[in-house]
Image (spheres, rainbow, N blue to C red):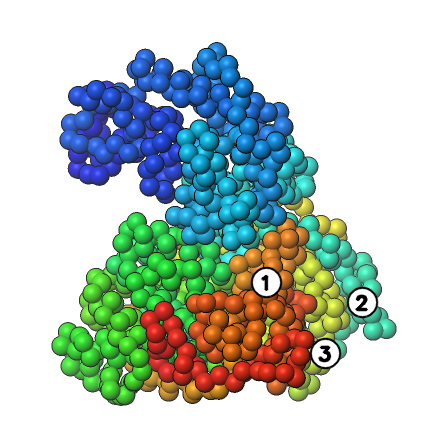
């Protein structure tokens, strides 16, 4: 610790702290332009100059490191004169167009001039003009370069935090200008973080331009609905109409950053396909009716099917309170455990429960990625959880965290990783087993003999697993670190090998812990409340709190509180529910807030299943394709139309706030559940959001003690204490077989991650058309070039889209994003078959050349596949 005195106030701070940081702790305001907390100091704006006793010249406080006994003054006449002169120089060329500038009312330059600026300018020359008109850099970002004050925040934010490097500077001195490459932002993430950090109106949001002034807006702090990172944001509305989103600089995992979906993708709430009134099916068509008519119809239909099985599917985008009440409705009113919360995978609860109970760390992401090593397993963080990617890049660059990547597809984070290992899709389990074997081989002497025997019996010893040196490199890096974090993409659950992958993750974490490592693990979900959905018990084999349905004590405690018996047998997951439908054994199928016809990986099967259910009930905000098949459609409140909570990837529970009334004749989701329960003469109690939250805090162990007031601006962490695993080691799966076909995988794109984002008109102006991504080598052998139209054909269907050539892509792999409704990607797939074997042809000559590739030539960043061939 070192001591510093600022304006006669003394403080002890950590060595390496700056004068500006110390002043902030003392509540002393020092003005800045170029300084930004998460960026390295630039010290170019000279607004933060201070006097340091013993030094002749003024020093930039943002870059001046404190020394023992330093004495600083921040408000002397010389400092005041210097600040005034700097502002006078900025104003010399700054256009005085405040009345039409979108930044008016929240401009940092305006505020600085009012507080520190000159009252008369000494500059009388004509103002410099770069361009007479604003430059449209992208569909969402427009620039007035004349207003730029050269703080470089935007350029540094883009390069150092986002990693996109879409902005740069040209010329020097007073002629310096910020611009995109060749005057555009073609390589941009369109995240708008440059707009957020711009202190003036140089960079602006085009969708918000000229729509409102900040004092016109009613602003509401809430949580982003697009992915599980759980970013905090502020929604601005004028007279109930959605206007814009900005980030909350001081709160949340994201602080000042958002991704394109969070900043520009909330206009989906204004989608034109909102369900306006309840609808029932008459003569083969859905017709609007009143809620009373819908109730009469549903009562009759429910009575007719009460002797058959029932099933329920709820979206992990819904709030905790809604999900909790949904599973209670299904278990107590419909008397079934046939419930699920994912349309894209089946959750193997036996393996998942052990992993979550033993290792899941409910703590700030910023803390867990500060460990010595962070291993990211599966998925593509850049496109699935962009803000998480920003934090990982910061950890790798500024905190020297050893970033390790093990995945089928490349991501932008590969450039910051110490080791990157490409694995065949579905081969993650075998690769993780190889890492465990390599760890045991190099550190066996550190493990107890009985543990070594258990591992050897389970995985057959290190010699049983062969492959490239990728696992060895990962094992060496993991062994060196004192603390290790695993970030696990939920994308791994798509594979038929999901159970084996979770088991090998359990093996790896157990071995690391036995080696004395400080171990943490979190999932990377691409749905806003997937963690909450699991915690709330929207699973066929798990009750709220992830307690097994077969747990008599847990079931009895809930039944006593709910006043109704709970079935004791585990239920059917979505796949088994659809089988019941096809077999004619499903009476009522209740779907809330999701569209399996688009997202389930077998469109033909789910179409037949939904059509075979005796009664299909759909509760949603939008008229989805699944709703189009329903017998009754119940309009529900959408995002921003009801309050509640989300639980993000960290296990942090945060408030989502209501900022407008439900559209048309929609009702809140909880009110709709009450409506349905009343038709069965079994009312749900409690039924309001606050009361349901209180019941969750009382009955779900991880949430006990939480209060809505206690969530605060940053939310509150659930407190499920990991229980030590029973040292059960699982056998390694066989390596995936080599194939001579392309293997199709899917996932999220940067601008779309589900049916919410696809309803955003703004995101649709940003997003490219659907694309097929493959390696440059494969494209060359097919005689294809970037942007060519190609045909992708499986045994079950085909689609056409433009080609996107990726030089870092492994050979033999084809990626098509899943979030384009018109593409109907799931028509190519069959359940239980992932990845999907396909052929690729030139679209203009579909009978022409295709490539049957021997994946033994597949390459990765480290020139080798881990754990087998694709």
> What is the number of the mark on residue 611?
3
Rendered image quadrant of residue 251: top left
The tag earlier along the polypeptide, 3 or 2, is: 2
The tag earlier along the polypeptide, 1 or 2, is: 2
Q: Please tell me how crowded label 3 is: few (under 14), some (14-19), or many (20+) other residues with Cα within 10 Å.
A: some
Disc 3, disc 1: CB below 8 Å?
A: no
462 or 590, which is in the foreground? 462
408 or 356, which is in the foreground? 408
Helix, strand or loop status at disc 2: strand
Residue indicated by mark 1: 754
Q: Is residue 278 left or right of residue 588?
A: right
Q: CA distance from mark 3 to mark 1?
A: 23 Å
Count of all numbered marks drawn on residues in the image = 3
Residue indicated by mark 2: 286
Q: Please tell me how crowded label 1 is: few (under 14), some (14-19), or many (20+) other residues with Cα within 10 Å.
A: many
Q: Residue at x 13, y 77 (%)?
A: 445
Can residue 725 be spotted in the picture?
no
Disc 1, disc 2: CB below 8 Å?
A: no
Q: Position of residue 750 (x, y in %)?
A: 53, 59
Mark 3 vs mark 1: give the one in front: 1
Q: Position of residue 524 (x, y in %)?
A: 44, 63
Q: Residue at x 43, y 63 (%)?
A: 411
Q: Please tell me how crowded label 2 is: few (under 14), some (14-19), or many (20+) other residues with Cα within 10 Å.
A: some
Helix, strand or loop status at disc 3: helix
């Amino acid at each position: 610790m070192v001591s510093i005195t600022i304006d006669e106030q003394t403080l002890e701070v950590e060595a390496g702290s700056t004068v500006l940081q110390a002043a902030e702790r003392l509540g002393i305001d020092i003005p800045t332009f170029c300084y930004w907390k998460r960026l390295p100091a630039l010290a170019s704006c000279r607004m933060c100059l201070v006097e340091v006793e013993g030094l002749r010249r003024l020093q930039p406080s943002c870059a001046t490191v404190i020394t023992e006994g330093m004495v600083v003054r921040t408000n002397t006449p010389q400092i005041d004169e210097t600040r005034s002169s700097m502002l006078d120089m900025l104003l010399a060329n700054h256009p005085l167009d405040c009345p039409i500038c979108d930044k008016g009312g929240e401009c940092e330059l305006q505020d600085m001039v009012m507080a520190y600026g000159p009252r008369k300018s000494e500059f009388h020359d004509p103002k410099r003009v770069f361009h007479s008109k604003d430059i449209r850099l992208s569909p969402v970002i427009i620039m007035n370069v004349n207003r730029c004050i050269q703080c470089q925040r935007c350029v540094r934010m883009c390069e150092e935090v986002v990693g996109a490097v879409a902005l740069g500077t040209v010329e020097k001195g007073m002629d310096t200008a910020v611009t995109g490459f060749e005057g555009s932002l073609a390589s941009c993430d369109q995240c708008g973080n440059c707009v957020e950090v711009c202190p003036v109106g140089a960079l602006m949001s085009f969708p918000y331009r000229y729509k409102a002034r900040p004092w016109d807006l009613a602003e509401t702090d809430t949580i982003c609905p697009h992915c599980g990172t759980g970013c905090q944001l502020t929604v601005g509305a004028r007279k109930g109409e959605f206007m814009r989103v900005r980030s909350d600089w001081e709160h949340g995992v994201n602080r000042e950053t958002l991704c394109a979906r969070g900043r520009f993708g909330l206009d989906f709430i204004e989608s034109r396909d909102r369900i306006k009134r309840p609808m029932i099916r008459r003569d083969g068509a859905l017709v609007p009716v009143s809620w009373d008519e819908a109730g009469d119809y549903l009562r009759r239909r429910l009575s007719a099917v009460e002797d058959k099985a029932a099933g329920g599917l709820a979206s992990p985008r819904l709030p905790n309170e809604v999900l909790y009440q949904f599973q209670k409705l299904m278990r107590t009113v419909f008397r079934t455990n046939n419930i699920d919360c994912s349309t894209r995978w089946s959750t193997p609860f036996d393996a998942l429960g052990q992993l979550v109970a033993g290792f899941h760390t409910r703590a700030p992401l910023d803390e867990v990625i500060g460990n010595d090593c962070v291993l990211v397993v599966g998925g593509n963080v850049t496109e699935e959880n962009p803000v998480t990617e920003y934090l990982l890049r910061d950890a790798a660059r500024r905190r020297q965290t050893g970033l390790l990547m093990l995945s089928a597809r490349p991501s932008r984070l590969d450039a910051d990783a110490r080791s990157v290992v490409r694995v065949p899709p579905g081969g993650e389990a075998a690769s993780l087993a190889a890492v465990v074997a390599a760890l045991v081989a190099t550190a066996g002497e550190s493990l107890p003999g009985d543990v070594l025997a258990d591992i050897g019996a389970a995985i057959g010893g290190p010699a049983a697993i062969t492959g490239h040196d990728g696992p060895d490199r990962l094992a060496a890096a993991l062994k060196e670190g004192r603390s290790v974090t695993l970030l696990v993409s939920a994308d791994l659950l798509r594979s038929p090998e999901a159970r084996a992958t979770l088991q090998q993750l359990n093996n790896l974490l157990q071995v690391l812990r036995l080696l004395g490592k400080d171990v943490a693990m979190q999932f990377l979900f691409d749905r806003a409340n997937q963690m909450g959905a699991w915690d709330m018990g929207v699973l066929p084999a798990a009750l709220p709190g992830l307690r097994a349905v077969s747990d008599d004590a847990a079931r009895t405690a809930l039944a006593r509180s709910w006043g109704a018996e709970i079935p004791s047998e585990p239920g059917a997951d979505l796949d088994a529910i659809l089988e019941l439908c096809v077999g004619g054994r499903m009476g009522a199928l209740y779907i809330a807030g999701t569209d399996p016809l688009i997202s389930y990986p077998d469109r033909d099967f789910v179409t037949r299943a939904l059509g075979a259910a005796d009664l299909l009930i759909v509760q949603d905000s939008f008229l989805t394709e699944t709703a189009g098949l329903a017998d009754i459609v119940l309009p529900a409140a959408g995002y921003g139309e009801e309050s509640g909570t989300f639980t993000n990837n960290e296990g942090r529970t945060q408030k989502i706030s209501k900022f407008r009334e439900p559209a048309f004749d929609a009702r809140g989701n909880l009110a709709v559940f009450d409506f349905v329960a009343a038709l069965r003469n079994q009312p749900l109690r409690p039924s309001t959001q606050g009361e349901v939250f209180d019941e969750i805090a009382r009955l779900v162990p991880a949430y006990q003690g939480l209060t809505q007031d206690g969530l605060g601006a940053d939310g509150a962490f659930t407190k499920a204490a990991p229980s030590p695993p029973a040292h059960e080691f699982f056998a390694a799966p066989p390596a995936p077989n080599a194939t001579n076909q392309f293997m199709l995988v899917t996932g999220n794109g940067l601008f779309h991650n589900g049916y919410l984002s696809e309803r955003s008109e703004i995101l649709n102006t940003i997003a490219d058309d659907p694309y097929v991504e493959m390696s440059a080598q494969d494209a060359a052998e097919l005689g294809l070039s970037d942007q060519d139209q190609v045909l992708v054909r499986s045994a079950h269907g085909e689609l056409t889209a433009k080609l996107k050539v990726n030089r870092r892509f492994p050979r033999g792999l084809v990626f098509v994003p899943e979030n384009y409704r018109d593409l109907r990607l799931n028509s190519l797939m069959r359940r239980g078959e992932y990845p999907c074997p396909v052929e690729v042809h030139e679209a203009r000559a579909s009978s022409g050349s295709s490539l049957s590739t021997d994946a033994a030539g597949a390459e990765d960043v480290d020139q080798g596949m881990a754990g087998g061939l694709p």
